[in-house]
Amino acid sequence: MTAPQDDVPTLVATSALYRTRREYHKALRCASQALQRDSHYPNVYFEIALLYFDCMLPKEVHKICRLALILLPPNKYWEHIFLGFLQENIQEWEKAKARYKMALKANDTTDDFYIATFNIACMYTHSAKYDKAKRRFHKALEIQKNTISSPHQIGLCLNNIGMCYGFESDTQSAHKFYTEAVTTCPQLLRSFQQRIETNLALGNRKEALNDCNTAIKLTTHRETIAEIYMSRIFANNQTIQGIVNDTQEAIRYNPRSATSYDLLTRMIEPGPHFDPIRLLLDAVSKCHGDAQGMSMLYTRLAEIEEDQKKVMEYDNIAEALYRRVLDRVS
């Protein structure tokens, strides 16, 4: 039985919420259902594009944007939005911003211009023009409150204003907006993660620990849970064993977390029941393909290995891997 098209905006909104919680499979399932029910609803295509973008799949972003431009009824606003996102997908921030501004000037749509305004703010953020970004996010916030009034979208605006203050090293203001974001949308994982950092910077360890515990419950994304357990180490005034427990939980959720293995070898004394070299060599095999992580592990191996021949070997491997990381950046 075909569901009524009224359900489509709800499915798109649910997909967006799953996406911000990094539960990408659930997000894609909702977005795909929405697309099946209404293939002429532009927001569906844009949500799928955002999903692929967050998953770092640029080719898929390109495909869905091009598909939208072909299949959707003519609409200048959405044409500029998708063309702008194609530019954003290849990190052409200025060209993307120009397209989003063109979308705002389009006169053949009844859209509320929230997406274009929000995306322009994001482009200013990429260009480190934080005052302009904040003004645009505030404008997007105003549009959202006066139209759809989605707690999730309002929370995202507040979160991103907080991020701008964070980039400007204004921790108090950043913390204020992250708090407003989680108050408006208690399921906004990224705001809890950001507030963990501001709480730690402000010395609010108890509040940071509470945010860690809340954030862990908001997602099933294993790498994210591992990151949060690593934050718990700094939030919790605990014993060495407590630090070890949180680090082991991080490894359990993300066996490729090189930082966790490195920390574990610093927290536990070598002995009959713990061989740090064996642990690190095992970690290297699990982190295969992650040059930066493997470089960290080989550096740590060189620090604790007693056989000087192996120390030189590990140092050389670490240096070669680090060069590979630098080559990718340049």
Image (cartoon, rainbow, N blue to C red):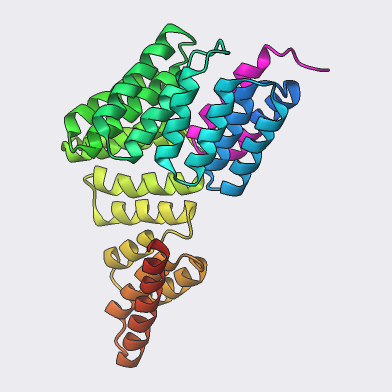
Specify the principal SS of the magenta part: helix
User: Splitting the image into 4 quarters, where does residue 298 fall?
Assistant: bottom left
Question: In the image, what residue occupies the spot 29% across and 49% down?
Answer: 233
- In the rendered structure, the answer to whether residue 186 lies left or right of residue 199 reads right
Q: Which residues are magenta?
A: 1-28
Question: Does 284 sit above or below residue 210?
Answer: below
Question: Does 89 sit above or below residue 207?
Answer: below
- In the rendered structure, the answer to whether residue 326 lies left or right of residue 89 reads left
In the displayed orientation, state which residue is furthest to the bottom.
309
For the question of whether residue 45 can be seen, the reply is yes
Is 194 or 119 nearer to us in this picture?
119
Residue 12 among those drawn in magenta:
yes
In the displayed orientation, state which residue is furthest to the right.
1
Q: Position of residue 44 (x, y in %)?
A: 63, 26
Q: How many marks?
A: 0
User: Splitting the image into 4 quarters, where does residue 133 fall?
Assistant: top left
Q: Position of residue 54 (x, y in %)?
A: 51, 41
In the displayed orientation, state which residue is furthest to the top.
146
Question: In the image, what residue occupies the spot 29% across and 22% down?
Answer: 135
Is 126 or 150 nearer to us in this picture?
126
Give the position of the N terminus as an image quadrant. Answer: top right
- In the rendered structure, the answer to whether residue 92 lies left or right of residue 69 reads left
Give the position of the C terminus as an image quadrant. Answer: bottom left
Is 61 or 266 nearer to us in this picture?
61
Q: Position of residue 182 (x, y in %)?
A: 36, 24
User: Splitting the image into 4 quarters, where does residue 306 fall?
Assistant: bottom left
Question: Does 280 sit above or below residue 22?
Answer: below
Question: Does 26 sit above or below residue 144?
Answer: below
Question: In the image, what residue occupies the spot 29% across and 26% down?
Answer: 134
Q: Position of residue 328 (x, y in %)?
A: 42, 64
For the question of whether residue 152 can be seen, the reply is no
